[in-house]
Amino acid sequence: MSRIASSPSPLPPGTAPTEGASVPAPLPPPTRTAQCRPASASGASSVEPYRGPSLARQPELAVPGPRSGPRTGADNQFDFGVGGAFPPKPTGNLMEQLRQGALTAAQSEAAAASMVMGDNAAVDAYARVHLDQLKPSPPIPGAPTSLTDYTSTIPGVAPEQVYAYFVRHPAAVFEAAGIRIRPATAVLADGAKLFLEEKGLPPVWAPITVRLEPGANTLHITTLDGHPLRGTNRFVFEGDGEGGTQVRQYSAFQGSSPATTLGMKLMDPIERQHDIWREVHGHLHDVLRPR
């Protein structure tokens, strides 16, 4: 696999450690891997700010809903390249790292309870209340940052259709990678805050916020307080010049707490991250490509 020629991943400028997010109270009692390139030996990376233009909302498109079953043998040319500083190291001062670690632990307990309780209105209500307390936690500018650029293709499908599908069917997109959205979300909204529920050991509630640029067919995901990683993912859906779409995803991340270092020793979260995004790209291809 070759390194993808692309601009650095985006980060909001001047991000400083956030303060004031409290550790969530416990919940009430209950009533799939892509091969990674060798890690880059390069040092610290600083990430340039990215600001998308303010663009008007585009007309609604007719977009197919999720289909059951993959396209056997389908090839979306999924590939990725890595750069920056690997493995990701915890960033921020000690107090900030401890605060982030406490939130991660509390949210892991909530994820365990959620898995026991299943689809439950109380779980969704709990998630909404505590997401409101969490602030964006993107990588800290100037600190060592791990970078990954993912790319794939969807022949015969316009970028507007791919973007619209992602926005209108987020549950199906993430469920393809074994991830559940909490609270249950039918359609992504600009500024939405969500937990991505990972079934692993331990289970994880990874909080994110979403920013939409419909006119640019671009979707931004930024982690929130308590996410095991400080990170951003920018999905750009571009025309390939032949009536299809090239999906480009720019990922930048750092560790958020000592839990990152522990996780790197006990499991392989980076490989799991590659696997998640491989499945997301594959789902978009398999569902949308004309049969």
Image (cartoon, grey):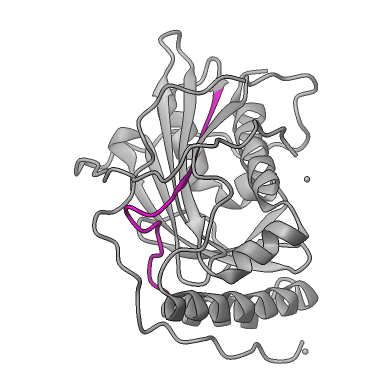
Q: Please tell me in which quadrant of the rendered image residue 75 appears.
A: top right
Residue 141 lies, in percent from the top left, at 32, 54
Which of these two is toward me, 234 or 127?
Answer: 234
Decide: is 21 above or below 254: below
Asked where in the image residue 196 lies, by quadrant, the reply is bottom right
Region of the chain picked out in magenta, as a range: 134-152
Is residue 136 shown in magenta?
yes
> What kind of secondary structure does the magenta stretch mostly adopt?
loop
**Image point 43% across, 77% down: which residue?**
96
* 216 in relation to 266, above or below: above
Name which residue lies at 69% across and 41% down.
275
Q: Position of residue 183 (x, y in %)?
A: 57, 69
Q: Position of residue 147 (x, y in %)?
A: 48, 41
Quadrant assignment for the C terminus: top right
Q: Is residue 72 above or below residue 60?
A: above
* Whether residue 11 can be seen here: yes
Which quarter shows the N terminus? Answer: top right
Residue at image coords 69%, 62%: 263
Give the left or right position of residue 248, taking residue 171 as reference. Answer: left
